[in-house]
Amino acid sequence: MEHIKNSTAYYVELEERYGAHNYHPLDVVIERGEGVWVTDVEGKRYLDFLSAYSALNQGHAHPKIAKAMIEQAQKVTLTSRAFRNDQLGPFYQELCELTGYEKVLPMNSGAEAVETALKAARKWGYSVKGVPEGQAEIIVCEGNFAGRTISIISFSTEEQYREGFSPYTEGFKIIPYGNADALAAAITPNTVAFLFEPIQGEGGIIVPPDGYLKRVRDICTQNNILMIADEIQTGLGRTGRLFALDHEEVKADVVTLGKALSGGFYPVSAVISREDVLGVFRPGDHGSTFGGNPLACAVARAALRVLIEENMIENAEKMGAYLKAKLQSIRSPHIKEVRGKGLLIGVELHPTSGGARRFCEALQQEGLLCKETHHHIIRFAPPLVITQEQIDWAFERIERVLMMP
Ligand SMILES: *Cc1c(COP(=O)(O)O)cnc(C)c1O
C-alpha cells in the first residue's frame, strides 16, 4: 500500500481492492458524525445533505438513541422469535399508537419489509379475497424503487437493476406513476394490491399530482385491493408529516417502514397494517432471525420517541419550505425544476448541464455532501434536525456551485 495510512486514498484503495464495486461513492471517508455534521479521516467537516437516503432523519449519533442502544446491548441483544423479549411488545404498541395502524411485523432491511408486504398481499388475496391460487397480481409503478431482491427487481423499470439477474418473479403489472386512471384501468378480478411510493425517492423525487393519494385510496377501496404505501424513504417526518400519505389525510391498508425507523443506528424495518391483512400469517409462514430483536426494538423505540419529542417533523416542514423557496430563487441556467415536500427536495438539471455528479463533487469541495439520482437530479435531504443557520450556510454553497459554468 503506497499511501500514507489513515489518508483518504488509503481507505479508498482498501475498499476498491477488497470490496465488490456495487456502488460509486464520493471519495470522502467519514470517521465521525454528530447531528447534521460528519468529519472525514483528514479532519475535514461536511454538512450531510443526504442523511443516508433518509435513514438519518434524527441526525447522526443522536445521544438518546445511542444511550438506548448501549443500554440494551449490555442487557440482551438477540433472543430470536423462538422466545419473547421485553422490547418487542412495547415497540409494537408504541408504533401502533403513533401511526394509527393495528398490527406490526418487524424485519430488518427495507427490501425485507417490502417482500413481507408482498407476501401478505398475496396470501390475503388467496385466503380473504378469494383469488384462485397462483393468479394474484400486484400493480406497481414505472420508476419504482423498493429494494434489490430478485422479486423486487423483477418489477423494476430501471434496466440496470434487472440486467443479468433473470429469471424474474411473475405476478406484477406496471403502470405510469401519478396516474390514477391507469390504476383503475389495470385492475382485474385477480388484482390483490397496488404497491407505490407517495413520492418516488430513487425515481428522482417525483411528486404525484394533488389528489392522487385520495384517488388511489378510493380506487383501492372500490375494487377491494390493498393499498400498499412504501414509506421507507418518505415516512417518519421526511416530508414534513409523519407519513407522506398524511398530506392528503389518507390511510393505506399496508405501510412499509425502514430507514429512519432506527435513526440510522441499526437495520430496522416493519410492515404496519390491519388485523385482517397481517392476520394471514400463521406460525412458520414467514420470519427472520434478527427481525424484532430486542436491540432493534430498543433502538427503534428511542428513534421514534426523539422524532416526536424534539418536534423534528414540524421542523422538517418549516425548514423544507424555507430551503425549497431559496432553491427556487436561484437563477441558474442549469436548473430545470426544484420540487419536493418537506426536506425531500430534488433539483432537476437540464440534460445539457453535464450530469448532476460534477455538481455533487463541487459541493463536496465546498463541504456539503449530497448525491445525484438518475444522472441529472440532485437530491437534498438533510437530517430533520437542521437549523435555519445551517440551511443558510448550505445554501450559500449550493448557489455558488449551481452558478458555475
Ligand atoms: C431505500 C428504500 C427501500 C429499500 O430499503 P433497504 O433498506 O435498502 O433494503 C425500499 N423502498 C424505498 C422507497 C426506499 O427508498
Image: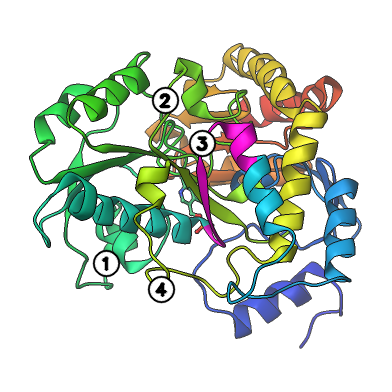
In the picture, measured across the screen, residue 308 lies left or right of residue 379, that is right
- Rendered position, 179 above or below 65: above
**Residue ID at (87%, 52%):** 44
Are discs 3 and 1 less than 8 Å apart at CB?
no
Label located before the other in sequence (2 or 1): 1
Measure the alpha-carbon separation of dots 2 and 4.
39 Å
User: What numbered label is drawn on residue 101?
Assistant: 3
* Membership of 375 in magenta stretch: no
Are discs 2 and 4 less than 8 Å apart at CB?
no
Name the amino acid type tagged 4: Gly
**Residue ID at (56%, 28%):** 345
Q: Which residues are magenta?
A: 95-109
- Where does residue 344 sit, x and y in percent of width and height? 58, 31
Measure the alpha-carbon separation of dots 4 and 1.
33 Å
To which residue does mark 4 refer? 284
Label located before the other in sequence (2 or 3): 3
